[in-house]
Amino acid sequence: MKLREFAYSRSGDKGDIVNLCVFVYNDDNWDVLRRELTVEKVRDIFGSLVNGEITRYELPGTKGLNFVMTEALGGGVSMSLRTDPHGKSYQSLILEIDIDADEEIKPRLG
């Protein structure tokens, strides 16, 4: 299953750094998110878009993960020749990650 089936994301930028958060729709899926969404999986899907470090922070109060990615915008908004110098499309790309937990995922609430 795709990550987007049980989580949503938000992103922001500052200079050449992207801040990307992923939150579960249903708090019961928090442990699956923590286990499955690793720095390695994030690095694999972003490939050469991120040349620096990727650091993961857990946000248990909001049931989310925060990924800070350096050297991720081709120099930053005022220097980048990328079509998305702010990295807003990164929030959609991360949701394409395959998660192997179909049987564990609880449905959305409400």
Image: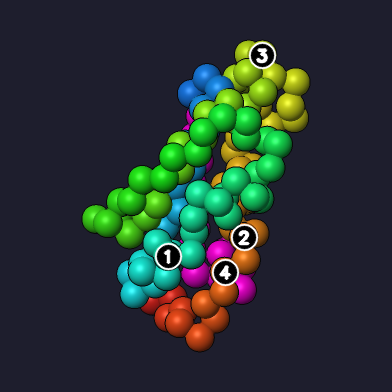
Residue 24 is left or right of residue 73, and the answer is left
Q: Secondary structure at mark 3?
A: loop
Q: Earlier in the sequence, mark 2 or mark 1?
A: 1
Cα–Cα span, label 3 and label 2: 29 Å
Q: Residues within 10 Å of mark 1 (few under 14, many from 20)?
A: few
- Say which residue label 3 marks: 79
What is the number of the mark on residue 99? Answer: 4
Amino acid on which disc 1 is placed: Arg
Cα–Cα span, label 4 and label 3: 35 Å
- Say which residue label 2 marks: 97
Magenta region: which residues? 1-13
Q: Secondary structure at mark 1?
A: helix
Q: Earlier in the sequence, mark 1 or mark 4?
A: 1
Amino acid on which disc 4 is placed: Ile
Amino acid on which disc 3 is placed: Met
What is the number of the mark on residue 35? Answer: 1
Q: Give the x, y percent position of residue 47.
A: 69, 42
Count all numbered tags in the image, as a single digit. 4
> Between tags 3 and 1, which lies in front?
1
Residue 47 visible in the snapshot = yes
Q: Earlier in the sequence, mark 3 or mark 1?
A: 1
> Between tags 4 and 3, which lies in front?
4
Amino acid on which disc 2 is placed: Ile
Residue 27 is left or right of residue 17, and the answer is left
Q: Secondary structure at mark 2?
A: loop
Q: Give the x, y percent position of residue 79.
A: 66, 13
Q: How is the image coloured?
A: rainbow
Residue 75 versus residue 106 in the image, above or below = above
> Between tags 1 and 4, which lies in front?
1
